[in-house]
Amino acid sequence: MSSTWGTNIKLSIFGGSHTEAIGVVLDNLPANEKIDLDAVRMQMARRAPGKDKTATTRAEADEPQILSGLLNGITTGAPLAAIIQNTNTRPKDYSLLKTHPRPGHADYTASIRYDGANDIRGGGHFSGRLTACLVFAGAVCRQILERRGVTVGAHALQIGAAKDSAFDPVHVSADVLNALNTRFFAVNEAVAEQAMRDEIENARLDADSIGGVIECAAVGMPAGIGSPMFGGVENILASILYGIPAVKGVEFGAGFGVSALRGSENNDAFYYGEDGHVYTETNHAGGILGGITTGMPIVFRVAVKPTPSIGKIQNTVDLLEKKNDTLTVVGRHDPCIVPRAIPVVEAAAAIALLDMML
Ligand SMILES: Cc1cc2nc3c(=O)[nH]c(=O)nc-3n(C[C@H](O)[C@H](O)[C@H](O)COP(=O)(O)O)c2cc1C
């Protein structure tokens, strides 16, 4: 197993849902960058569980313990390493999951891939808990990005049938993103939040779960960053976004919608602004052409599947007896992953954009 990502920045994440701690190492960060640890903690609190009925009741302090790479709040240039203790694990017998894989989880695939040796407790290294490390790393990277004029923010665009208004892909601004990127359950329109909470509550009362879409934007990225064919901004963002558990789709700009458009509708016409910079009138490209930033906002959406752990009886197999069987998943779970995954998507985007800028 290797959970390492990045070209210029190297991100490594280790640990599991029920190990003593989880941790993260960020190599190659620029030196002499001031890091506000309160701002890091605030981002981690947005993702941390136990806040309300939309999230698991597993309460974790999520306090990062920095081991190296930071001296008096300034990056030293050495690898930045941090661990986060797992304080709220519930020791119990997980052996049933070895023989009865949970539908929608990696229990079955991981047991084949790792010959049954994988830590299955709470999903082990596949757990959403590991995203606390991504948020830590992203909170550091976003401070460095902000100093270079780049702002990232995201919101819940859809949960079940409830929808928020989408970003204006041309005019979305740092102010709009900054109004979202410190909030739990960030939405553009307050009415959408209640409708989304109702969708989540209805699923929860039905011992079920529900999926959704997170929309993210980054502004301030200069034109000319990224490379064809495999080093493009889409490639790099997608590769880290698909590292977030439960992410099943990523689309940029008009995304799958381009398939219904004519070229005359989809092409973003260029013009010179009064400041002498080149802009586009529309932004179906989501700020990316040929894998390279245009200088317009980068806009993408992420599809998040419904939480696989649900309270209903499900069909599975008994791998020991080699027969069909049923399983009832017990434990504490998010009825919807979207609210807690919003800061995770922002964090992943910040890490990827900084990686490309360096
Ligand atoms: C922030 C976050 C929290 C999550 N919480 C849960 C949870 O409480 N219960 C659960 O079954 N899955 C949860 N997941 C998703 C699973 O970890 C994931 O679906 C599973 O490991 C299988 O991986 P895959 O969906 O990427 O294929 C969470 C994911 C994220 C990003």
Image: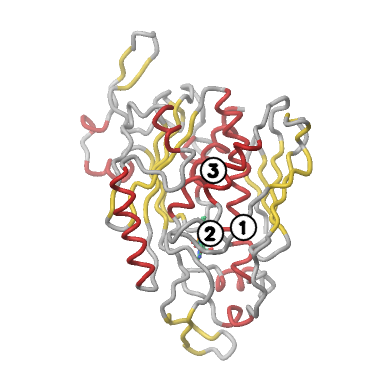
Residue in the foreground of this view, choosing between 233 and 45: 45
SS at badge 2: loop
- Which residue lies at the image location 43% right of the left edge and 23% below the top edge? 295
Whether the residue under disc 1 has CB within 8 Å of ligand 1: no
Q: Quadrant of the C terminus?
A: top right
Q: Do the CB atoms of the residues marked 1 and 2 lie less than 8 Å apart?
A: yes
Q: Which residue is mark 1?
A: 60
Q: Mark 3 belongs to which amino acid?
A: Ala
Q: Quadrant of the N terminus?
A: bottom right
Q: Nearer the viewer's eye, disc 3 or disc 1?
A: 1
The numbered disc on residue 268 is none
What distance separates the C-alpha of mark 3 from that of mark 2?
Answer: 22 Å
Mark toward the start of the polypeptide (1 vs 2): 2
What distance separates the C-alpha of mark 3 from that of mark 1?
Answer: 21 Å
Asked if 226 appears above or below 198 in the picture, the reply is above
Q: Residue 201 in the image: state x and y as whole percent.
A: 36, 64
SS at badge 1: loop
Taking the image as shown, residue 311 lies to the left or right of residue 133, namely left
Q: Mark 2 belongs to which amino acid?
A: Gly
SS at badge 3: helix
Q: Which residue is mark 2?
A: 50
Q: Mark 1 belongs to which amino acid?
A: Glu
- Which residue lies at the image location 22% right of the left edge and 39% below the top edge? 261
Q: Which residue is mark 3?
A: 348
- Label 2 environment density (alpha carbons within 10 Å; few <14, some 14–19, many ≥20): some
Residue in the foreground of this view, choosing between 324 and 245: 245
Mark toward the start of the polypeptide (3 vs 1): 1
> How many numbered callouts?
3
